[in-house]
Image: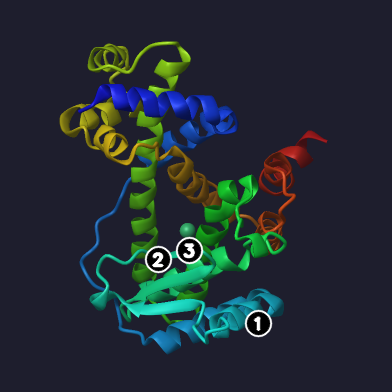
Amino acid sequence: MDFKKIDSVVDTFVKNNSLRIDTLPMVIDYSKQILNKKSLSFKDGWSREIELNDSIKNVYKFLLTLDGELASQFYNILMSKDENDKPYVNLLPRDKHPEGKNEVKDGRIYIYYDNTPLDMFTILHEMLHKMNECKILEDELNTETFARDYFGETVSILGELMLGEYLVNEGIITKEDFDKRKNLRLNNSKEAARDILIENELIELKLQGKEITYENLIEMFNTFDKTTSEYFVFADEKYDGSRLKNINRDGKLRTPVSQRYVIGYFLSNILSRRETLEEDFIKLHTAIGDPEANINNVYYDIIVKEVHENKK
Ligand SMILES: [Zn+2]
């Protein structure tokens, strides 16, 4: 392991990401709560097969229950083609693309399907990312604002939770299918939470003016209370070094990406239990599509509004 390289990567991050570092304490708290949630185990497979076209129809019908405009936007994007008649949405069979990553990239959407209930969640998730891309900035292909960067996953993951409820109520999937989907999401969020806790300690060392060396990391590890999340996450890291290896290989931290999933998992679980769920979902979806959106306004107006209202 090249600790000098890791030290320089973290040093650069600390110098260029003051906004992200300011919001880290909140994300760390979310990460610890996610790591304390218990994962369940399920047997392999799903209750049924479902054809891609049926999956698309079900997602469309779900969106119709929320908002007619959202549903037609979904349909229009699915049908849209570029000047060379190439569709923007690429629906590809998973078995032919085992390494394919579901994502929105350079304005195009890549979705890998395997004819299981999972497809409906993937379709909605990626399409929501596309649907709330900032419209004004689209021409410049610069579709990220900090608010979108921060809350983009919250909208997509919250959408998945609402879709799951709908599909269970309609008898399209079983409750176990939905629980399984939620558990997959929890497990992914736990991985992201581990990235955050490890990288935060590296950032912390740099903020204290220390160099990232094996000795300094061990010294820090020895200060952790053995009952804390930091302790068990670092005990695993001490054993396999997997996250330090990633930083060494990629030359960058994962915090900017991982925090979106931690925030998304945590906040979507809070929002999904609200009476005003549908209204808040649309508000958040609209807000992050606004290139002028301010992260604090979005946070206080939509997410902690209960706290605000109680304070009045
Ligand atoms: Zn996503």
In the rendered structure, the answer to whether residue 95 lies left or right of residue 22 reads left
Work out whether residue 277 or residue 109 is closer to the camera in this orientation and state it: 109
In the rendered structure, the answer to whether residue 239 lies left or right of residue 256 reads left
Way the structure is coloured: rainbow
Residue marked by disc 3: 105
Work out whether residue 155 or residue 293 is closer to the camera in this orientation and state it: 293
Judge whether residue 154 can be spotted in this image.
Answer: yes
The secondary element bearing badge 1 is classed as helix
- Type of residue at label 1? Ser
Residue marked by disc 1: 72
**Cα–Cα span, label 3 and label 1:** 22 Å
Q: Position of residue 217 (x, y in %)?
A: 28, 17
**Cα–Cα span, label 2 and label 3:** 9 Å
Say if disc 3 is inside 8 Å of ligand 1: no
User: Looking at the image, is mark 3 or mark 1 nearer the viewer?
Assistant: 3
Work out whether residue 309 or residue 255 is closer to the camera in this orientation and state it: 255
Location of residue 136 by image quarter: bottom right
When the figure is inspected, residue 73 is found, relative to residue 238, above or below; the finding is below
In the rendered structure, the answer to whether residue 47 lies left or right of residue 71 reads left
- Type of residue at label 2? Asn
Location of residue 35 by image quarter: top left
Q: Position of residue 128 (x, y in %)?
A: 56, 67
When the figure is inspected, residue 310 is found, relative to residue 156, above or below; the finding is above
For image coordinates 44% across by 19% down, the residue present is 204
The secondary element bearing badge 3 is classed as strand
Residue marked by disc 2: 102
In the rendered structure, the answer to whether residue 130 lies left or right of residue 207 reads right
For image coordinates 20% across by 28% down, the residue present is 1
Contact between labelled residues 2 and 1, with CB atoms less than 8 Å apart: no
Q: Position of residue 74 (x, y in %)?
A: 59, 78
